[in-house]
Each structure stands twice: as structure tokens, then as C-alpha cells.
Image: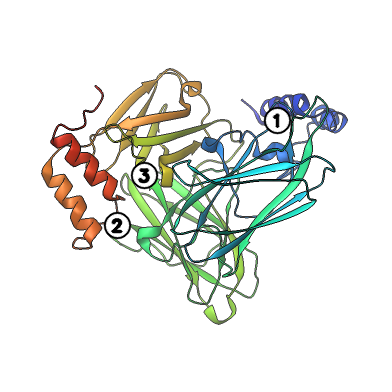
């Protein structure tokens, strides 16, 4: 599919949502203008479920709610013992906006409805986690009505919306070929940002950064799971070739830390350039305990096997920039779990889909997980909590039976 065809499809969808921009988009399609409304509401769609939530790491302006597609989902990381302020600027008079907050298990922990033009909600969290926001109309909309709003979240410590990520164990996955870069900052002179990606052998990726604070200089180091440093470098575009199929870690820190406090930058990792055509959004869970699994590695094999992703808290993952997929293979890997290959008939079969993988029900695996949880043994390549160990013990004891594969 070429860029004009893809733009036309998005144009048609948006026309169906809002008549206000009909003439503008008609002119754009006629003259072949693409990318004109960068970061407007159409660029964030579809985001009608938590599977396709957008990162709230920067101010989202000109967001719209419509009578039919009337949900916008956002996500952000939050640190405990830190006060956050959620600000919603409602540009539509006399129509309320409803806001609901969820943790990474999609359990509702806060809800409010307001018709104020500017609403500010103070939020505090009792543990570090990924959180989701759902924005909906506070009342029934009729055909022709819409709500326009801006949304932003900040905090008293000037953290970006990926903290805490100062150590390798807290590295945040980054979506390869994502629509938007990650918006990052150094909240103090000692701040370090850690990211991770699932790289495939002999594939060349490019790290692209943009410095939003000219006085600050930062260094980027690329590491594999053996902590072999590929960097450092201060280049704005860094191509690197992966020597194996594995997780690679990216460390970013300031080179002149005395002037980098509260400085900002963006980062994006690309595999191919061009128009992003399709995405797969899914969730990885333990087949026996139904516990979401973080840091599972997902690989899509079509004409090649270079489309990958890593699950975040809540088990969610996104794989971007897929042209077509008929009878494709998805391979899911996580340490202490059996490899899970599945054939899917089409991309539509992988939209908002839950994938269940099976643990190795051996007591040695339980003991190893307990050692990690107690700090006796370090393991930076896997993420577990107590529920994983309890689930394995219940399976071994026959108290919980896994569904058949």
C-alpha cells in the first residue's frame, strides 16, 4: 500500500467521525498533501481500548470525542510517593468529560466527571506501575456533536512519564517504528534513562534522538544482555547491527550533567522508513494463573522475522509497521516458560488479542523465582512477582489445572 492510498483510508475514517474538517481533508486528498495535521486527533486514532492506548508523555492537544467512537485511552508510568497532576482543558462548553484511572491489571482505582473548562486532579500512587486513563463524554452525544480537549500530566519531581527507570532492571520497552517518539527528560543531573528492545540477528536498527535543550549534551550506550557496551556515542542517529536474537539495552545519560537538569529530548528506534501500515496489539498472560507477563519477547514471522516487541506491565505489547500477514507465525518467548508458536490467518486475528503461554511446572523453577524475589540471585532478563511463584506451586500441587494447549 502506498502512502497516498494509506492517507486516503485514514482520511475516509476521519470524515466519518467529524464533518467539521470535511472540506480541509477533501482538499488535502485532492492535492496529495500528507502529514499536514501532525499530532492532531486523527494521528492518535484508533485508541478506543487499553490495548491501543497512547503514551501520555507529552501534552496531547486537539483531542476529540465523537458520538460513536467516544473513548480515548492513555497510559503512563508513575512512581510511588510522588504527586501527579492531571490537567484536562475542555474546549466544549456545557458538555462534561468523564475520566477513569486504572492500574496495569485494568482495575479501576479512580473516576470523576467534570464540566469545568479546566480540570486539575491530584493523584498519588502507592507503588510504581503502568497506569491507564480512559476519557469519555460525561453525557450522551448526539450526531454532529463532539468534544475537543487537551490533556497533560506532570508531577512535583519533574519526572518524565517513564520513571523510575534509573537502573537496567527498570528499563522500559520501546516500540520499534512507533508513530511517535518517546518524550524523555533528565529531572536532575544524575538522572539515567534505560530502554530496551528485542533485536533480531543481523538486523540494522537506527536510534534517532532530538535534543530539546540545546545546552545539554547526552551520551547513548547500547548493551546486550551480557552488558557488552556497543557505544558510547553522542550522535543524533545511531545505526547498529544486532549480533543475536536477544534483548538489547539502551542507556542514556547526560555528558555535561551540570546544565542538564530538567532538559528534554525525544528518542525513536526505526527498522524501516515509510508509512506505518498496521499494528498488532496484544497481551501476554500465564495460561495457568492468568497473571499478566512482563518482558515476554514476541516475534512476528512473515516474509522475514524482524518484527518484534516486548510486553510491558499488564502484559501488553505492540508490534508496528506490518504490511500484510496471511498465515503468519507469532513466536512468544519468556524464560521459565515453554516457547509458544501460533499461526494466525490475518492481522485482524491479532487485534486486541490475549495470548496465553504455559509455565514449566517444575519446583526448581519456583525456587529460582523465589531467589530472584528475595534478592539472593539477580536476573535482569526476566520479570516476576510472587503471584508467578504461587501459581506454579498451585499447578505442581494439582490445586490449579492449566487449560489444554
The residue depicted at 65 percent of the width and 65 percent of the height is: 212
User: Does 393 sit left or right of 257 as displayed?
Assistant: left
Where disc 3 sits, the SS reads loop
The quarter of the rendered structure image containing the C terminus is top left
Q: Nearer the viewer, residue 391 or 242?
A: 391
Up the image or down, 390 lies above or below 222; here it is above
Q: Please report whichever mark, 3 or 2, sits nearer to the chain's N-terminal start.
A: 3
* 2 and 1 marks in contact (CB < 8 Å): no
**Element class at badge 2:** loop
Q: Residue furthest bottom?
A: 258
Asked whether residue 386 is in view, the answer is: yes
Position in image of residue 282 (x %, y %)? 45, 33
Q: Position of residue 33 (x, y in %)?
A: 78, 35
Residue 7, label in figure: 1
Q: Quadrant of residue 157?
A: bottom right
207 or 399: nearer the eye?
399
The residue to which callout 3 is attached is 202
What distance separates the C-alpha of mark 1 from that of mark 3? 32 Å
* Quarter location, residue 54: top right
Q: Of circles 2 and 1, which is in front? A: 2
Mark 3 and mark 1 in contact (Cβ < 8 Å)? no
Amino acid at each position: 500500500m502506498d502512502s497516498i492510498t494509506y492517507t486516503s483510508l485514514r482520511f475516509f475514517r476521519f470524515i466519518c467521525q467529524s464533518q467539521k474538517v470535511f472540506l480541509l481533508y477533501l482538499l488535502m486528498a485532492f492535492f496529495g498533501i500528507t502529514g499536514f495535521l501532525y499530532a492532531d486527533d486523527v494521528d492518535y486514532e484508533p485508541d478506543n481500548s487499553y490495548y491501543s492506548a497512547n503514551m501520555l508523555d507529552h501534552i496531547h492537544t486537539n483531542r476529540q470525542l465523537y458520538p460513536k467512537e467516544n473513548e480515548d485511552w492513555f497510559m503512563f508510568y508513575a512512581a510511588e510517593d510522588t504527586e501527579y497532576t492531571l490537567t484536562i482543558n475542555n474546549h466544549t462548553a456545557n458538555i462534561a468529560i468523564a475520566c477513569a484511572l486504572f492500574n496495569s491489571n485494568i482495575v479501576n482505582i479512580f473516576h470523576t466527571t467534570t464540566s469545568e473548562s479546566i480540570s486539575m486532579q491530584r493523584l498519588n500512587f502507592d507503588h510504581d506501575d503502568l497506569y491507564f486513563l480512559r476519557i469519555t463524554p460525561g453525557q450522551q452525544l448526539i450526531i454532529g456533536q463532539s468534544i475537543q480537549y487537551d490533556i497533560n500530566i506532570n508531577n512535583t519531581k519533574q519526572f518524565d512519564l517513564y520513571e523510575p527507570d534509573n537502573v537496567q532492571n527498570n528499563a522500559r520497552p520501546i516500540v520499534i517504528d512507533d508513530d511517535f517518539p518517546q518524550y524523555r527528560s533528565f529531572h536532575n543531573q544524575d538522572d539515567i534513562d534505560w530502554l530496551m528492545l528485542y533485536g533480531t540477528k543481523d538486523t540494522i536498527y537506527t536510534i534517532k534522538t532530538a535534543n530539546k535543550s540545546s545546552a545539554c549534551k547526552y551520551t547513548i550506550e547500547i548493551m546486550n544482555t551480557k552488558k557488552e557496551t556497543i557505544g558510547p556515542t553522542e550522535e543524533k542517529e545511531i545505526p547498529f547491527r544486532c549480533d543475536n536474537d536477544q534483548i538489547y539495552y539502551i542507556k542514556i545519560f547526560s555528558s555535561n550533567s551540570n546544565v542538564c537538569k530538567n532538559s528534554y529530548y525525544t528518542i525513536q528506534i526505526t527498522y524501516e522508513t515509510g508509512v506505518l501500515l498496521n499494528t498488532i496489539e496484544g497481551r501476554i498472560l500465564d495460561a495457568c494463573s492468568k497473571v499478566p507477563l512482563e518482558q515476554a519477547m514476541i516475534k512476528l514471522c512473515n516474509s522475514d522475522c524482524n518484527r518484534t516487541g516486548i510486553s510491558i506491565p499488564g502484559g501488553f505489547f505492540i508490534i508496528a509497521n506490518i504490511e500484510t500477514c496471511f498465515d503468519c507465525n507469532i513466536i512468544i518467548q519468556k524464560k521459565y516458560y515453554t516457547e509458544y508458536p501460533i499461526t494466525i490467518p490475518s492481522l485482524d486475528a491479532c487485534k486486541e488479542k490475549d495470548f496465553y503461554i504455559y509455565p514449566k511446572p517444575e519446583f526448581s523453577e519456583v525456587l529460582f523465582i523465589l531467589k530472584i524475589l528475595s534478592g539472593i540471585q539477580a536476573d535482569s532478563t526476566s520479570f516476576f512477582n510472587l503471584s508467578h511463584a504461587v501459581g506454579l506451586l498451585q499447578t505442581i500441587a494439582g490445586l490449579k489445572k492449566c487449560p489444554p494447549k
